[in-house]
Amino acid sequence: MSAKDFELNQPLEALVAEAERRFGGIVYEEVSIAGVTLQIPQIKDMPRYLDRLVGKTRPGDSVELPLWAKMWPSCLMLGMFMARCPLPEGARVLEVGAGVGVSGLVAASRGLKVTVSDVEPDALLFSRIGVLKNGLEANVEVVDCDFTKAELPNRFDMIIGCEILYQDHVYEPLHAFLERHLAETPEAEIVIALDSVRKGQGFFRRAEGRYRMMKQEFPYKDEETGQERASVLYRLRRTS
């Protein structure tokens, strides 16, 4: 479904029932990151769901894959950073393009005030289920936000995002969004994680001169293919 036709502010049981209706079943995958253990909702039978999608797609139309549902290695790396980052309790964090919101949930478990956002209604549904399942509703707000044009009422001490640089046309509006919503303090920071194959060069070229950038690479072995891969973490702070 392309439009949000449900309310996020419902009890956990009602949201789970909505997810079951949409996807034919969900399961909780236990994820442990730097001592934080979370129950993350996942589509129970992804191949079966994809078959349903293909069956409903008219000839000539493209299939919209639920990329938001995958827990990418770079998102787990970002979650590890959030578990250890030096933000004080109560600091405000915004996660953009959150998918199932792993990194934001890790941050919330530390006592940070987190806004988890995405443009995909189903991602919002799964994020909210994750919030309630893990008892983090006091620290997490889930909001519908298209970072290419949205305007939120607050600025944030840290803005984080995982695998959000896969489309070149978002680079300029994303820069404008980050500038409007990053707190105006020397310590305010943008943290972006991505697979090393997605360079995001256009985005980082635009950041030159505006931000000081730190880059750290984390190698890992892909369990599905056995290939050596790497995730990259970028930290950006304003130059002035």
Image (tube, rainbow, N blue to C red):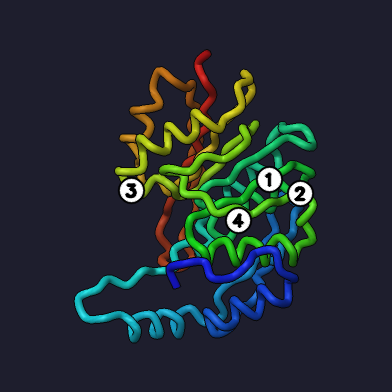
Give me the C-alpha separation between circle 3 and circle 2.
31 Å
How many badges with numbers are in the image? Answer: 4
Is disc 3 surrounded by few (<14), some (14 to 19) or many (20+) residues within 10 Å? Answer: few
Answer with mark 3 or mark 2, whichever residue precedes in sequence.
Answer: 2
Residue 76 at least partly seen: no
**Residue at left 36%, top 69%?**
64
Give the secondary structure at mark 4: loop
Contact between marks 3 and 4 (CB within 8 A): the answer is no
User: Pointer 1: what residue?
Assistant: 114
Give the secondary structure at mark 1: strand
Please say if 193 is above or below 204: below
User: Pointer 3: what residue?
Assistant: 167
To which quarter of the image does residue 58 belong?
Answer: bottom left
Amino acid on which the number 2 mark rests in the picture: Asn
Give me the C-alpha separation between circle 4 and circle 2.
13 Å
Give the secondary structure at mark 3: loop
Q: x, y percentage for residue 162?
A: 50, 48
User: Pointer 4: what residue?
Assistant: 101
Q: x, y percentage for residue 186?
A: 62, 18
User: Pointer 2: what residue?
Assistant: 139
Amino acid on which the number 1 mark rests in the picture: Val
Amino acid on which the number 4 mark rests in the picture: Gly
Contact between marks 3 and 1 (CB within 8 A): the answer is no
Q: Could you say which is closer to the camera, residue 223 or residue 186?
A: 186
Is disc 2 surrounded by few (<14), some (14 to 19) or many (20+) residues within 10 Å? Answer: many
Answer with mark 3 or mark 4, whichever residue precedes in sequence.
Answer: 4
